Structure formats: C-alpha cells, structure tokens
Image (tube, rainbow, N blue to C red):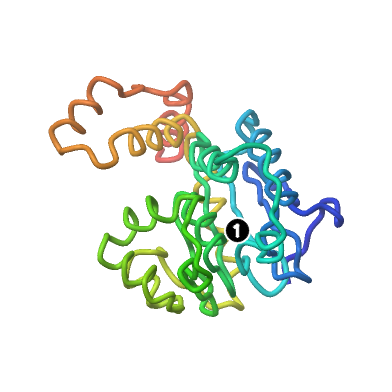
C-alpha cells in the first residue's frame, strides 16, 4: 500500500518531498480506474507542477493494489462528458511537456488507458508484479489518448501492432525486454527504489532537465543531421547554477 499525506478524498493526491513530488491515482477500491473527474484533478496538479520551481522530478503512481486497471468502462458505456474533444489526450500532452522529468512507477495492473497515461511519462519503472496490456481491440474501441502514437515510438511499430492486435498481457520482464519499461524492481524494494531514483534525479540541475527534455522532444524522429543542427542552434547553453555546481565539486575534491 502507498501512504498518502494528502486529502484522502481526492482522486489524485500530491505528496511533496525534498525537491520532488509524487502524484498518486487514488481510487484504490476501483483499481484506480480512470474517470473524467480523476483526469480533472490530474490536470490541475499538472498545471500546478509546471509552475513550481521547487519540484525537480515528478513520480506518478497508483494507490492500493495497482497503478491503474485503465479507463473506467462504466464511464465509457454511459457516455462520459468531457470538457472538449481530445481533452484526455490534451491532458496527457500537458503531462508529457512538463519541463521536468516525470517517472511512471508501475505496480500491478497497467492496462489500456492506464498504459497511455504511463507512456506520457518520460519513462516507466516496473515492480516485479506489474502487468501491461492494450485491450482496446477486446472492447471494439480505438485509442484517442495517444496509444497509436506513443507505443510504437517506445517499442517499435511491429511490437506495438502485436500488443494492439492480440490484446495480450505482458509481465514486467517482457516489458523491459521490448523497451516499454526501463527496469524491474522487486515489490518489497519498490518504494525505496522509487524514492532513491527521484532523489538522484532531483539532485541534478533543473535547468539541464528542462533543456534536455526540450531537445529530446523537439528532435524525436528527425534525421540525425537535422537533430544535430537543432542541438547546436537551439541549445540553451549554460544554466544559472553551473558555476555554483562546479565550485561545489572543486571544493569537495580539495
């Protein structure tokens, strides 16, 4: 179980640590199934984090037994009301474009809509009990939150087709093998590893994080020469904390 120090009634909670923040999908009794109301709270947190210079890394998790079982099917069947067309996708694009690293820490279920949420994060770390799958085809649905675009960019077109066509579930080790997740951690060490990872990221320059993320996003899919040219012309150069960081290193070395 993941403890929360935030409003227990919130559908998405935020817990601030030293230089990093954790967002937790908080419908554990419904396996964190994703609803419009949950997305509204997620969107509010994303907006607030974008303006919060104290936060250098964001971790996205799920409360209780899993990350999320996916889009709430009862919401779909009853005709959920969204603020605008493409609103879910727009929200995930906001998450993806946060100028700081965002890590999806996945344990248990991560299916379909939940996988689309995780894919909008910069990378996924999986507990050894994590299971991933895209079940759109099982329910005669097509993706509108980004699966068709982000999944093949992460794992390759053929592998994305296999997962989308079969609706097969895969375990954490297979997710790592195909490049969907970065690495696997035993569940009894998962909390400690996620905290350590977030702290290691947060120790580094927020300027560099924002600059590197901008470069990577802007040049994704470009030919190498075009990407190299972009890096030269659009590089943000040296950050305001460069001298301080070098001085601290030199003092420590002495």
Q: Is residue 161 left or right of residue 60?
A: left
Please report the residue visible at 66 percent of the width from the left and 66 percent of the height from the top. Answer: 73
The percent coordinates of residue 143 (x first, y second) are 47, 56
**Quadrant containing the C terminus in the rendered view:** top left
Q: Is residue 85 left or right of residue 251?
A: right
Compared to 61, does 22 lie above or below? above
- Label 1 crowding class (10 Å Cα cut-off): few <14, some 14-19, many 20+? some
Dividing the picture into quadrants, the one containing residue 195 is bottom right
Q: Is residue 86 left or right of residue 77?
A: left
Query: In this orientation, which residue lies closer to the viewer: 191 or 24?
Result: 24
**Quadrant containing the N terminus in the rendered view:** bottom right
Please report the residue visible at 42 percent of the width from the left and 26 percent of the height from the top. Answer: 242
Compared to 19, does 62 lie above or below? below
The answer to whether any part of residue 117 appears in the image is yes
Reading the image, the residue beneath label 1 is: 195
Please report the residue visible at 49 percent of the width from the left and 51 percent of the height from the top. Answer: 144
The answer to whether any part of residue 203 appears in the image is no
Please report the residue visible at 58 percent of the width from the left and 71 percent of the height from the top. Answer: 107
Compared to 43, does 31 lie above or below? below
Q: Is residue 29 left or right of residue 131?
A: right
The percent coordinates of residue 114 (x first, y second) are 56, 61
The percent coordinates of residue 153 (x first, y second) are 32, 53
The percent coordinates of residue 93 (x first, y second) are 51, 40
Dividing the picture into quadrants, the one containing residue 209 is top left
Query: In this orientation, which residue lies closer to the viewer: 177 or 240?
Result: 177
Q: How many marks?
A: 1
Residue sitting at the far left: 225
Query: In this orientation, which residue lies closer to the viewer: 77 or 89?
Result: 77
């Amino acid at each position: 179980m993941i403890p929360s120090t935030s409003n227990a009634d919130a559908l998405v909670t935020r817990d601030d640590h030293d230089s990093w923040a954790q967002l937790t999908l908080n419908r554990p009794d419904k396996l964190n199934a994703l609803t419009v109301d949950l997305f509204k709270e997620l969107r509010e947190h994303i907006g607030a984090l974008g303006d919060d210079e104290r936060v250098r890394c964001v971790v996205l998790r799920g409360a209780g037994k899993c990350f999320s079982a996916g889009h709430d099917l009862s919401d779909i069947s009853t005709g959920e009301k969204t603020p605008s067309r493409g609103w879910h996708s727009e929200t995930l694009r906001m998450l993806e474009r946060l100028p700081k690293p965002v890590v999806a820490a996945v344990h248990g279920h991560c299916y379909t809509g939940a996988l689309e949420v995780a894919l909008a994060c910069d990378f996924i770390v999986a507990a050894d009990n994590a299971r991933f799958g895209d079940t759109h085809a099982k329910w005669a649905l097509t993706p509108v939150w980004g699966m068709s675009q982000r999944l093949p960019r992460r794992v390759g077109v053929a592998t994305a087709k296999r997962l989308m066509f079969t609706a097969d579930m895969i375990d954490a080790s297979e997710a790592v093998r195909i490049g969907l997740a970065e690495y696997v951690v035993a569940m009894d060490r998962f909390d400690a590893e996620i905290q350590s990872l977030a702290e290691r990221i947060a120790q580094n320059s927020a300027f560099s994080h924002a600059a590197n993320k901008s470069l990577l996003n802007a040049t994704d899919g470009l030919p190498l020469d075009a990407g190299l040219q972009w890096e030269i012309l659009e590089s943000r150069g040296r950050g305001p904390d460069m001298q301080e960081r070098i001085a601290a290193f030199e003092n420590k070395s002495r």
